[in-house]
Amino acid sequence: MPAPAARLMPLQPASPGQVLPAPPVVDLWWFDARAEIVRPADAAVLAAGERHRAKTLLSALGRHRFEVAHVMLRRVLAGYLAAAPGELRFGRQRCPRCGRGQGRPVLLPGPRPAPFFSLAHSGDLVLIAVAARPVGADLEQDRAGCVCPVAGVLHPADAAALARLAEPDRHRAVIGCWVRAEAVLKCTGEGIGHGLSSLRVGLASGSTGRNRRVRGCSVRGLAAPPGYQAAVALAGPDAVTSRPMAALPGPG
């Protein structure tokens, strides 16, 4: 995906008063890390733990992508809460399967009801999903090498269906299954550490595919920029729909 033609601009301040969508709508915020710069004043809104994680990344590009993702997450959520980005505090719920405190990331209680959110970043892109119910989003950049071995960690029925596809259809379908399965795990709060083999998400048809019911969530693929695949999952019985809040990054 070519670099954007527009010159780099500083990260924009949060816009207070953003209204949380009613279920089953999910707000989707897309950002391209190449089109953002993070100045010291921007990074100052991050918590000490976030700044430490950024410093542990070996490459300057990796640190930049991490800072863009986490600064923009704070700015997006601050707009729904009419709060300052640096005031937000994050924690984790307990995993519903193992009971450990490594479940879904959440905003810690404040003066207003906190929205549910999910952050995904891959390559140069950042995707933030915001909803009134537990939500999960995943984003993956297409890989240049063979991804066929990845099918082995998916649900056996999905792996069997993938094996019947010819390349390059199989390559793209494997990543499509992965993002849908990981979106469900983020929504339920289980995390990828418990594996993907129990989640049958099916193969998508077309650019996004239809909604599927998986483990109490509705999950579907998303239209993503060339070279990427993405999915979103929302807890509850409704078919999830999305509301783009920032334009999809694309060729400059």
Image (cartoon, rainbow, N blue to C red):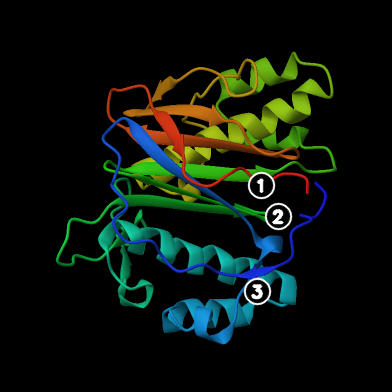
- Give the amino acid type for the residue marked by disc 1 in the picture: Pro
Label placed on residue 63 = 3
In this rendering, which labeled residue sits more in front, label 1 or label 3? 1
Cα separation, mark 3 vs mark 2, equals: 12 Å
Q: 121 or 224, which is in the foreground?
A: 224
In this rendering, which labeled residue sits more in front, label 1 or label 2? 1
Cα separation, mark 1 vs mark 2, equals: 12 Å
- Tag 2: Cα neighbours inside 10 Å, few (<14), some, or many (≥20)? some
Compare marks 1 and 2 and give the one earlier in the sequence. Answer: 2
Q: 68 or 140, which is in the foreground?
A: 68
Quarter of the image for residue 132 reads top left
Query: Can you identify the residue that label 2 sits on?
Result: 123
- Tag 1: Cα neighbours inside 10 Å, few (<14), some, or many (≥20)? many
Identified at 80% across, 55% down, the residue is 3
Query: Can you identify the residue that label 1 sits on?
Result: 249
Label placed on residue 91 = none
* Name of the residue lying farthest toward the left: 111
